[in-house]
Amino acid sequence: MMWHMVRKCFWVWALVVWAMRLALADTIQLKEKATITGKILAEKRDQVAVDVGYTVLVIPRNQITRISKTSDETQPAKTGVKTATATETREDSEPKQGLYSAATKTGPVRNVRDLVNMLGEAVVQVRTPSGLGSGFIISEEGFLITNFHVIEGETQISVEVYHQRDGQLERKSYKQVRIIAINKFEDIGLLKIEDKDAPKFKYVSLGSADALAVGERVFAIGSPLGLERTMTEGILSTKTRQLQGALYLQTTAQINPGNSGGPLFNLSGEVIGVTNMKITFGEGLGFAIPVETVKYFLEHRDAFAYSNDNPSNPYRYLQPPSHTRQAVAGEE
């Protein structure tokens, strides 16, 4: 009788523990309408690790549509982000870091004419003494994305924005532009307009290249050959074109010198890539950096921070001391 009571108490206790664990579990919804319940152990750029009790599952992010996360304690708010509650529910897009806006789900499809009018103010021309490129604003404070090769070796940078005023476009050049972060190997740069008279800027939302299917229509806005506010349209040819060890989006939308750093949009008006190169001896062979790479760069921008005052920053190489240069010259 005593052993029977012990076994009964044990099973009651096990059920209580299991119920408590289930109540505190995180829920992951997959594309095939399946659901996985467990404790999220780690969230990486391309996958999520979940403890389901008897094993740990590693789930690719492109198979996840939604995460409902339960936390035992309230998380402190980041800049521009509300404090999380005990139960946090979000769509599975990269979390907003206070610097950019990410679409939680793909918006309605619109015609390109309306999208160009709606998004045109956020697409800018980036000028340096040695050339020009394109860029796009990601926050009303004036943060913007362009290619690293557009600003490489430059410190005098200006940004030209077309503001809409009373139904007319007014061209404004901003000359107080600071480099915030750069990633030479991914060809991405983050700039900030710091002119004192700068207004609140119109900005674009970052979407998802993973959610896009090959063959879907896309369009680019930029300044090819200096022809500002030029729009080109095409389709997404492939999402996994490997060039020099990196994966790019390939598109038939015409990309030319001057488009570099500009946005590639889906038909919901969300940025899905950053145009950065083309094959010069072919037609309809343009390439863009996937927006997932841009989000990762923005969320880890402190690791790529650029400072003119820091001689140890990883992408600014100093000249050797004068006596070393003289010694080398003497050896020649």
Image (tube, rainbow, N blue to C red):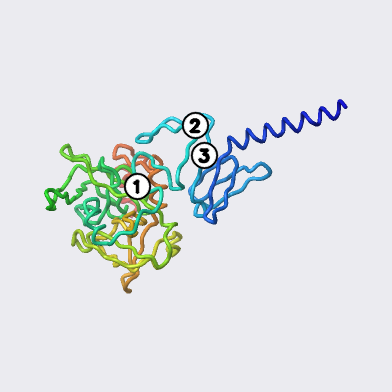
Q: Residues within 10 Å of mark 1 (few under 14, many from 20)?
A: many
As drawn, the residue found furthest toward the right would be: 1
The residue shown at (46%, 60%) is 245
The numbered mark, 2 or 3, whose residue comes first in the sequence reads 3
Image quarter hosting the N terminus: top right
According to the picture, the residue beneath numbered tag 2 turns out to be 86
According to the picture, the residue beneath numbered tag 1 turns out to be 182
Question: Is residue 105 positioned above or below 285 on the image?
Answer: above
The residue shown at (34%, 44%) is 100
The residue shown at (25%, 55%) is 134
- Tag in front: 2 or 1: 2
The amino acid pointed to by label 2 is Ala
Looking at the rendered structure, which numbered label has been put on residue 240? none
The amino acid pointed to by label 1 is Ile
Q: What is the distance, in whole Å, between disc 3 and disc 1 at their CAs?
A: 32 Å
Residue 27 percent location from the top left of the image: 55, 43
The residue shown at (45%, 42%) is 90
Q: Residues within 10 Å of mark 2 (few under 14, many from 20)?
A: few
The numbered mark, 3 or 1, whose residue comes first in the sequence reads 3
Question: Is residue 220 positioned above or below 312 on the image?
Answer: below
Residue 10 percent location from the top left of the image: 77, 30
Count of all numbered marks drawn on residues in the image: 3
Q: Is residue 123 left or right of residue 41?
A: left
According to the picture, the residue beneath numbered tag 3 turns out to be 69
Check if mark 2's residue and mark 1's residue have beta carbons within 8 Å: no
Q: Secondary structure at mark 3?
A: strand
